[in-house]
Image (cartoon, rainbow, N blue to C red):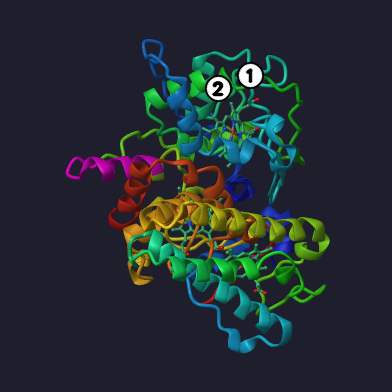
Amino acid sequence: MFKSAKRNPLLTASLLTVVMMAPNAVAHKDHDHSKAEGVVKERLDFMENMGKAMGGLMAVVRGQKDFDAEDVMANLNVIHKQSGQAITKLFPEGSNGAPSEALSKIWADWDGFAEVAGGLRTRVESLKSAVQSAGTDAGAQKAALQQNIRNLGGGCRNCHSEYRKKQNRD
Amino acid sequence: MNSIRLISWLLAGLITCGTGVALYLFLGAPTQQRTLHQIQGDAVRGAYVLRLANCVGCHTDREAGEEGFLSGGEAIATPLGTFFGPNITSDPDYGIGKWDLDQFASALINGVAPNGDHYYPAFPFTFYARLNDQDIVDLWSYMQTVPAVGNPSQSHRIGWPFNQRLLMAAWKTLFLSTSLSQANESRGDAWRRGAYIVEGPGHCGACHSPRGPLGNIDSANRLTGSTIGPDDEATPAIDPLALAEANWTADDLFWLLQIGVLPDGDVIGSSMADVVDDNTGHLNDDDLRAIAEYLVSH
């Protein structure tokens, strides 16, 4: 209904009462994968796994978990393995629509999508080498993680900003 | 941006209310006079204010590379047409190189152009009206150092009658609040700093507050989320109650604003990812902690 309302302010005004009675907020809820199937389910699980790896890294950065080089590397390796073409191959043309949050822009701008998928790879590689070149001192390794985690987060944001739109999960 | 959808509501309201009332409204837009000339500007601080107020977000085309910096933004789609943040580099012909401090301040806090035209609230001057004097002067010092780019601003694509800027005068009479102080004396410095950023330059409410019938921010329900956010997307509530309900801590908010990672390891998307990129990701830890403190406890 908003398509037409967009072009007609009077209609918008009359619809307003309806709109204003709608719930205002969107709660942040976990995405229910049970309604997804096939490649959509596959990539939701894939992305959720990526989120777990990111969450593990953040817990260290935030000081909620002690720095453990092996654990940090394992999480970085998950993201490394799950970047670039590992992402793009999970997005066959037209595989969106509820419950997927993927936007059609992915296929309208496939090169851009592939570029940010590859960008994540470059970023995680540079974070890995920063941690590795910090030697064996846990303090220095943790500092390298802290300095570069923003850059890694940017690798995820670059794609989520353009190609994904969170749905109302109420 | 969505903030413009309000203009369609405004118009609908005006037509409904009748022309007589409307005419009255055109005369009373509030204006602030500030005395700024005695204040020493600091361009380095000004570069920070630019980030604090996210001027980059609407005045830079991401695709245009470094030379595009502040020389004109991407399309902002709205119900009445498409707006483009103009070139605000120091170019004398295409940018704001010929402006003076008072003209710059008046654009930001009154939404009025040097020739007296009224700006559309796609330019969030209702929030910038709360900018403090020092921040305005520092920002102006910085703006003068922005390399000139001779890139003509794109004209907004708005049809009649929305293209009548005079309508904005009436809207301002109703909704431009010149109240400057968000300060609550019983709170600490960090909380007050957070209030200033969130309600002022940070303009979080431009997306996160519901809007009234004429597109004005519903100030009684500030930050409780909006059904019609940017790109027709709903924005979540970020008021203290909602945040508490969803178990957000101030520390969670700090990291979300700095890196964009949600407490569960997911990474923020949509227009909020751009906010992190252009705006909150550039702020110092003290300011991010201040924003977080204010959000959970105002």
Residue B90 shows which numbered tag?
1
The residue that appears at 68% across and 14% down in the rendered structure is B92
> Label 1 marks which chain's residue?
B
Stretch of the chain drawn in magenta? B184-197
The residue that appears at 34% across and 58% down in the rendered structure is B251
Image spot of residue B32 (x, y percent): 42, 24
The residue that appears at 60% across and 62% down in the rendered structure is B233
Q: Name the residue under label 2.
A: B143
**Is B189 contained in the magenta span?**
yes
Disc 2 marks a residue whose amino acid type is: Met
Furthest-top residue in view?
Answer: B38
Q: Please name the predominant secondary structure of the magenta segment in the image.
A: helix
Determine the image quadrant of residue A19.
bottom right
Within 10 Å of disc 1 (Cα), the crowding (few <14, some 14-19, many 20+) is: many
The relative height of residue B235 versus residue B181 in the rendered view (above or below) is below
Please give left or right for residue A11 compared with residue B266 in the image: right
**Depth order, front residue of B137/B169:** B137
> Label 2 marks which chain's residue?
B
**Depth order, front residue of A131/B220:** A131
Determine the image quadrant of residue A76.
bottom right
Q: Are the numbered discs 2 and 1 placed on the same chain, yes or no? A: yes
Q: Which of marks 2 and 1 is nearer the N terminus?
A: 1
**Is B215 contained in the magenta span?**
no
Please give left or right for residue B174 compared with residue B86 in the image: left
Q: Is residue B158 visible?
A: yes
Image spot of residue B55 (x, y percent): 56, 35
